[in-house]
Image: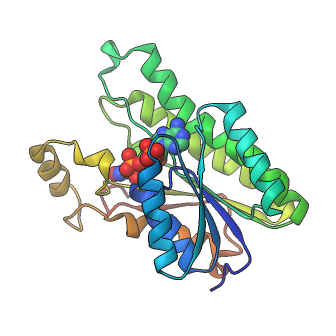
Amino acid sequence: MSLKGKNALVTGGSRGIGRAVCIRLAVMGAHVYINYVSNPEAAEETRQTILAAGGTADVLAFNVADPAQAEGAIKKLIHDAGSLDILVNNAGITRDGLMARMKEEDWDTVLDTNLKGSFICAKAASRAMMKKRWGRIVNISSVIGFAGNAGQVNYASAKAGMQGLTKSMAKEFASRNITVNAVAPGYIVTDMTSTLPEEIQEKIKAEIPLACLGKPEDVAGAVAYLVGDDSTYITGQTIHVNGGMYM
Ligand code: NAP
């Protein structure tokens, strides 16, 4: 229970990887704020799973791509709860399409959600962490931010940007005992990847040395390590959770 007494906010905690992270951090003893944007039922399901496991959690609706809304919600959380110790920037979307046909709007939405949303949330959360001289920020980027991918120039750029954000924040915040790291998942079984046609999934599997897609819990394990007691001397780093598909 190394996170007893800590408050953790997980953006996009209602489903997929974010849900697994919420559950894992709650089991470690944190009080978890489950953020979502459009799916209150899924967020409540995450909360109920945490309560059933003996943890504590609240749901918190806001759109990470709306700076005023996100900043306002995090400010209120800090005011009401007294602290925010852990932030996991997990909320993310894809709007795929080949470069030549990609609408500017799809570029903007993906960058605003994945990259700018992470900046806004981290900026708001870091105020409380700096005051307390303790904090853990984990950004969920992607293998695509390292390898690139045809049809995902927007997503790859956003996720690569999150790597620069991670390292720069790590340098700015280190003197305040705030570590900032990233986790870069490969292909993980969630709603985001379930839309991939069967033959594409088989093709992806064939390129993964461990020969299967990952589970949300695989990513949650890496996040747990980065916010727990065993990683206090690690900052500005990325843990790749991808079955070996990118080395
Ligand atoms: P998912 O199953 O599609 O879930 C996305 C989550 O993000 C949901 O909780 C959703 O909330 C939330 N969200 C989306 N837009 C939001 C916004 N504007 N404001 C607040 N919350 C928002 O996705 P996932 O596969 O778990 O992915 C989670 C993260 O891992 C993303 O950053 C993704 O890029 C990254 N990732 C995923 C994979 C993969 O293979 N799945 C691989 C690499 C990286 P609602 O429920 O309210 O819609």
Q: Which of these two is toward me, 64 or 231?
A: 64
Q: Position of residue 69 (x, y in %)?
A: 68, 35
Q: Position of residue 236 (x, y in %)?
A: 66, 57
Residue at 73% x, 40% y is: 71
Residue at 54% x, 79% y is: 27
- Look at the image and tell me in which quarter the N terminus lies: bottom right
Residue at 65% x, 70% y is: 31
Q: Position of residue 123 (x, y in %)?
A: 76, 44
Above or below residue 125? Residue 86 is below
Residue 48 visible at all: yes
Above or below residue 108? Residue 58 is below
- Residue 180, located in which quarter of the rendered image? bottom right
Residue 221 visible at all: no
Q: Position of residue 221 (x, y in %)?
A: 47, 73
**View extreme (right): residue:** 131
Above or below residue 225? Residue 89 is above
Q: Which of these two is toward me, 66 or 101?
A: 66
